[in-house]
């Protein structure tokens, strides 16, 4: 199992370590529910050093990225971040990622931990332009501070005015308690917050400084468990569940990140065709009417007929309900429609509802 | 981790308490701690007859569902339905949060269960 630079800190602070995609990471500290509420009401600190970081540099770096991703990189300026899927020629998703633009010839790509090697090979095998691709994951640690109090806490450690970093903006080489870092106003919880990229050797020091700086605000360390329930309530997709090589971004309702009006990109033809014919499957949100918690891969039925499966399901700590996301035959995706989730061989009633379950509270 | 004296235990982390003619069944402190926050419980109905080793219910944490197994065969006489609305009480007081009480078919099955020492050793090994 790979260890992040914060592994020892997690052990010392009582994090419960599990294996996740080959990494040893804390699933929880004080408990998933407590950490979840803490992020919604105050702030939580996450070790996300397992994420992959890949740089693309060179005169044609932008042109190359534009051909690989479905979103439109020309829409962002320097010091801005863009979220995008990238697809196979058939429209299935290779991964979803964040792209940080330093300038026209220099980009940082942040990919899902478990996909890092696959993505790196994909990037290299599709390179035709004049650009250099490097996997720098081992040289980068990442800490996320998320929640309505995240800005107040982080501000204590820097002279930069964090209000100058707008949603999906970033600043590089700023000092946090004397430690050089890249800071972006991004996250995976549906709350305001920041993601901090820094050198692995500095990560333990910054982690502890953040925790003590945030004591009054109620900042707590949080684990993968809360990270998942938080992103799920905000209906943010998770690779391998809402999107995968078998699920297109259009099916996953990520159409706003697929710019079919831009120049050629990998997957464009397939996605264009899918959009014209409208996808056969679509992601839907639902809440349980009967008693039961939906889980990943449970089947969904309507009138006794199988119409799809649950991509993510859980108890929702914020809504105090059992809810789920399901990939269903499109014709059945109608708000208020009653469907059945098969839980331990019993069909239990659920109702399709609007997404997201939890309205995101970003500071724009 | 608490492992009270006077109870019997199973390898699947259920506890069993004999009280008059009934056997009360719940899950152990070790079980609740490994599950994390419990948010859902499903229990059998009164009158159900279940064999030792059969699934008698389900506890679900935020992350996952786990079966609860019958430590011994018997007929369900009482169901603690109050737990259904307060599943967190299993986290808070696992040994007060009995789930069902059964009338055992064969009381000698109790002998086959683990005692306090044996169960403590099992938990230490799993950690």
Image (cartoon, coloured by chain):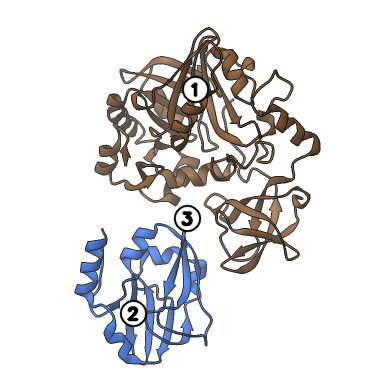
Left/right of residue B120 with respect to residue A300 in the rendered view: left
Chain under callout 2: B
Name the image quarter holding the C terminus of chain A: top right
The chain identifier of the residue carrying mark 1 reads: A
Q: Secondary structure at mark 2?
A: strand
Circle 1 SS class: helix
C-alpha distance separating marks 1 and 3: 39 Å
- Residue in front for this viewpoint, A356 or B110: B110
- Displayed quadrant of residue A204: top left
Q: Position of residue B4 (x, y in %)?
A: 25, 73
The image shows residue A15 at horizontal and vertical percentages of 31, 46
- Rendered brown, the chain in question is A
Q: Decide which of A264, A342 is in the foreground and name it.
A: A264
Q: Residue at x 75, y 36 (%)?
A: A274
Q: What residue did someone put label 2 on?
A: B16
**What percent of the width, then of the height, locates residue B101?**
42, 83
Q: The N terminus of chain A appears in which quarter of the rendering?
A: top left
For the residues carrying marks 2 and 1, which lies nearer the camera in this image? 1
Q: Is residue A80 left or right of residue A8?
A: right
Q: Chain B in the picture: what colour? A: blue
Q: Is residue A312 visible?
A: yes
């Amino acid at each position: 199992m790979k260890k992040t630079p914060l592994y020892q800190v997690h052990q010392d602070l009582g994090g419960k370590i599990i294996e996740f995609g080959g990494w040893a990471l804390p699933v929880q500290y004080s408990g998933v529910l407590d950490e979840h509420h803490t992020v919604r009401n105050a702030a939580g600190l996450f070790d996300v050093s397992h994420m992959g970081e890949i740089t693309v540099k060179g005169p044609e770096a932008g042109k190359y990225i534009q051909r690989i991703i479905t979103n439109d990189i020309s829409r962002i300026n320097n010091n801005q971040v863009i979220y995008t899927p990238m697809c196979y020629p058939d429209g299935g998703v290779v991964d979803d990622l964040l792209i940080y633009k330093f300038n026209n010839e220099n980009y940082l790509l942040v990919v899902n931990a478990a996909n890092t090697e696959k993505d790196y090979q994909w990037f290299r095998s599709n390179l035709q332009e004049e650009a250099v691709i490097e996997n720098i994951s081992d040289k980068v640690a990442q800490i996320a501070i998320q929640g309505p109090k995240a800005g107040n806490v982080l501000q204590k450690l820097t002279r930069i005015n964090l209000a100058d970093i707008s949603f999906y903006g970033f600043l590089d080489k700023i000092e946090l308690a004397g430690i050089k870092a890249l800071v972006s106003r991004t996250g995976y919880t549906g709350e305001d917050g920041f993601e901090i990229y820094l050198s692995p050797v500095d990560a333990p020091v910054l982690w502890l400084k953040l925790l003590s700086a945030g004591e009054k605000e109620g900042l707590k360390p949080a684990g993968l468990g809360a990270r998942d329930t938080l992103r799920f309530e905000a209906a943010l997709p998770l690779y391998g569940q809402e999107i995968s090589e078998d699920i297109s971004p259009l099916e996953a309702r990520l159409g706003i990140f697929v710019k079919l009006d831009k120049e050629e990109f990998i997957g464009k033809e397939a996605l264009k065709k899918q959009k014209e014919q409208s996808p056969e499957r679509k992601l839907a949100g639902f809440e349980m009417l009967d008693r039961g918690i939906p889980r990943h891969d449970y089947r969904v039925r309507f009138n006794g007929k199988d119409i799809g499966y649950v991509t993510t399901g859980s108890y929702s700590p914020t809504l105090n309900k059992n809810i789920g996301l399901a990939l269903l035959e499109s014709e059945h995706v109608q708000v208020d429609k009653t469907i059945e989730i098969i839980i331990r061989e019993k069909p239990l009633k659920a109702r399709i509802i609007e997404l997201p379950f939890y309205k995101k509270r970003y500071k724009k | 981790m608490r492992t009270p004296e006077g109870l019997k235990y199973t390898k699947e982390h259920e506890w069993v308490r004999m009280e008059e003619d009934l056997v009360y069944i719940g899950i152990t402190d070790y079980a609740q701690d490994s599950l994390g926050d419990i948010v859902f419980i499903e229990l059998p109905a009164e009158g159900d007859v279940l064999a030792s080793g059969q699934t008698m219910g389900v506890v679900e944490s935020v992350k996952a569902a786990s079966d609860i197994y019958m430590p011994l065969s018997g007929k369900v006489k009482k169901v603690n339905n109050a737990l259904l609305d307060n599943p967190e009480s299993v986290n808070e007081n696992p040994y007060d949060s009995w789930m069902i009480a059964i009338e055992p078919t064969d009381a000698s099955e109790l002998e086959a269960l683990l005692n306090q020492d044996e169960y403590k050793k099992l938990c230490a090994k799993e950690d």
